[in-house]
Image: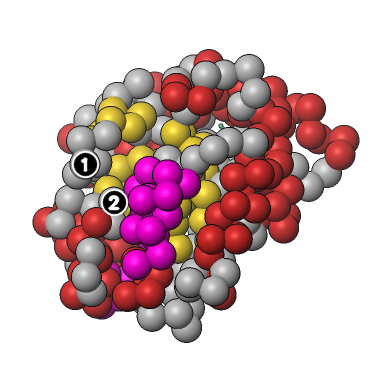
Amino acid sequence: MDFIQLKDGTKLPILGQGTWFMGEKKQKKEEEIKALQTGIEEKMTLIDTAEMYGDGLAELLVGESIKPFKREDLFLVSKVYPHNAGKEHIFDACNRTLQRMQTDYLDMYLLHWRGRVPFAETVDCMEELIKQGKIRRWGVSNLDTMDMEELFRVKNGENCMVNQVLYHLGSRGIEYNLLPFMQKEQIALMAYCPLAQGGTLRHNILNAKSVNEIAINRGITQMQVLLAFVLNQKSTIAIPKASSCIHTKENVDAASIKLTENEIKALNLEFQKPKEKTYLDIV
Ligand SMILES: NC(=O)c1ccc[n+]([C@@H]2O[C@H](COP(=O)([O-])OP(=O)(O)OC[C@H]3O[C@@H](n4cnc5c(N)ncnc54)[C@H](OP(=O)(O)O)[C@@H]3O)[C@@H](O)[C@H]2O)c1
């Protein structure tokens, strides 16, 4: 597994595990725990969750899944709702998250999306949570370029470590000016929906000629081509969600695929780079 380095020097695996919609169905729980544990054993030690997912059920599932592992070997990420991201609610919200995840601290706490609480207040709270030992570092999610620029103008805004945004082969808008801004400021990209939610977010993406040719030539799946494409960006962590061990293992294998220049060219031809600014894609 390759690593990227955050601007505080922390090394992270390029592949983590998403958890949206996990922990919500009793009959699937055992399989989902096994899938997350298989991922951890395969070095996908970064787990992404949020208080929003199943109203805490995904955080509970993560808490159960990590029990057999050493805490210091994991990198746990959760997200605070925008309406909880101010001084009145964030400390309780963070404590509830820690309780559900059965841990004393988060490695990263993200503002899930921009709400009404001013950035300055959220940043102050994040810095206070670091002082209290509840979180190690913080970041944001779903912020476009202008939001990021505004964040950087508030005190300590530059301490933001990552921006978690939607990015997959069929949705490349961030390459226009968000990704260049983040790369200039050493903000890592945490790419969500790297598999276009199993291909459902972009019509026919799995049947695309370039994707199929690469998959056939290399003897890999179309989904692995999508993941390899995202991981081709520098300073990027992809967090695919897999609720079966088979999918987890396929995703791990995709992390070592290095696309050739010709393969990238073919993908670029069919899924063009953005030529102008588009609104940030979200789900
Ligand atoms: N910050 C935000 O606003 C935000 C928004 C969306 C998502 N996220 C985070 O990003 C994570 C990933 O996004 P996502 O879950 O929406 O979409 P995704 O990871 O792009 O796609 C997940 C889908 O792909 C399937 N899949 C996984 N591996 C596969 C494989 N090797 N072959 C075939 N199918 C495969 C999964 O099926 P199975 O479940 O059956 O394995 C699931 O249906 C989330 O879980 C969440 O942690 C954050």
Could you tell me residue 104's position as x and y percent?
Answer: 54, 38
Tell me the colour scheme of the image: secondary structure
Q: Is 153 part of what is drawn in magenta?
A: no
Figure label count: 2
Q: Residue at x 28, y 57 (%)?
A: 160
- Judge by depth and name the residue closer to the eye, 155 or 15: 155
- On-image quarter of the C terminus: bottom right
Q: Is residue 114 left or right of 263 when viewed as pictured? A: right
- Asked if ligand 1 lies within 8 A of label 1, the reply is no
The residue most toward the front is 132
Could you tell me the amino acid type at mark 1? Asp
> Gap in Å between the C-alphas at discs 2 and 1?
8 Å
SS for tag 2? loop
Can see residue 150? Answer: yes
Magenta-highlighted residues:
124-149
- The residue beneath circle 1 is 8
* Vertical relation: 124 (above or below) 257: below
- The residue beneath circle 2 is 161
Could you tell me residue 235's position as x and y percent?
Answer: 24, 42
Could you tell me residue 88's position as x and y percent?
Answer: 54, 74
